[in-house]
């Protein structure tokens, strides 16, 4: 069990008194969720929601970066994502629409 848990409602770290998640907790979370980045995002998102209720004076962008932004930093490998094809067949031009000369 980590000593770097959040102290609410001010969301400071119980282990080092820095804003939570502190650098130590971020490293721990990365290790804990190394194979589950979506689960990490869901966990941090729920913390973000609670923090916005506890600290309504803090700008949303600041809280977003603090709780979620660090998970997508460039030095971290991005998880592979499979995209479904969204290709569609183009619609036939309307006969009523005038053709433009090329």
Image: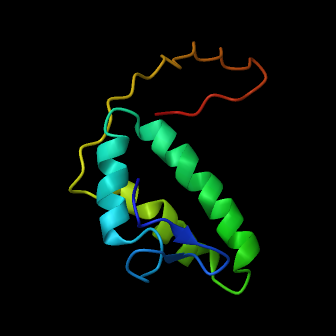
Judged left or right of residue 35, residue 83 is right
Along the horizontal axis of the image, is 15 left or right of 87? left
In the displayed structure, 36 sits above or below 53; it is: above
Q: Residue furthest left?
A: 75
**Percent x, y of residue 65:** 47, 69
- Is residue 27 placed above or below 10 in the rendered structure? above
31 w.r.t. 98: above or below: below
- Quadrant of res 11: bottom right
Closest to the observer: 102 or 20?
Answer: 20
Q: Which residue is rendered at x = 38% and y = 72% of the image?
A: 22
How many badges with numbers are in the image? Answer: 0
Check the image and tell me how it is coloured: rainbow
The residue at the far right in this view is 96
- Which residue is depicted at the point 62% across and 81% down? 10
Indicate the position of residue 72 as horizontal and vertical percent values.
36, 54
**Residue 71: quarter of image:** bottom left
Q: Residue at x 65, y 17 (%)?
A: 91
Image position of 78 with respect to 74: above or below: above
Q: Give coordinates of residue 44: x percent, y percent.
A: 54, 54
Kindly identify the residue that appears in the image at 62 percent across and 62 percent down.
Answer: 48
Residue projecting furthest to the bottom: 57
Q: Position of residue 18 (x, y in %)?
A: 42, 82
**Which is more toward the observer, 42 or 12?**
12
């Amino acid at each position: 069990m980590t000593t770097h848990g959040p102290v609410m409602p001010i969301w400071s770290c119980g282990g080092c008194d820095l804003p939570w998640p502190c650098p130590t907790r971020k490293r721990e979370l990365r290790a804990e969720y190394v194979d589950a980045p979506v689960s990490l995002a869901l966990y941090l998102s729920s913390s973000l929601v609670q923090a916005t209720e506890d600290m309504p004076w803090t700008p949303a962008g600041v809280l977003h970066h603090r709780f979620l932004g660090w998970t997508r930093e460039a030095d971290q490998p991005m998880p592979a994502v499979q995209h479904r094809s969204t290709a569609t067949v183009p619609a036939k031009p309307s006969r009523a629409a005038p053709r433009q000369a090329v």
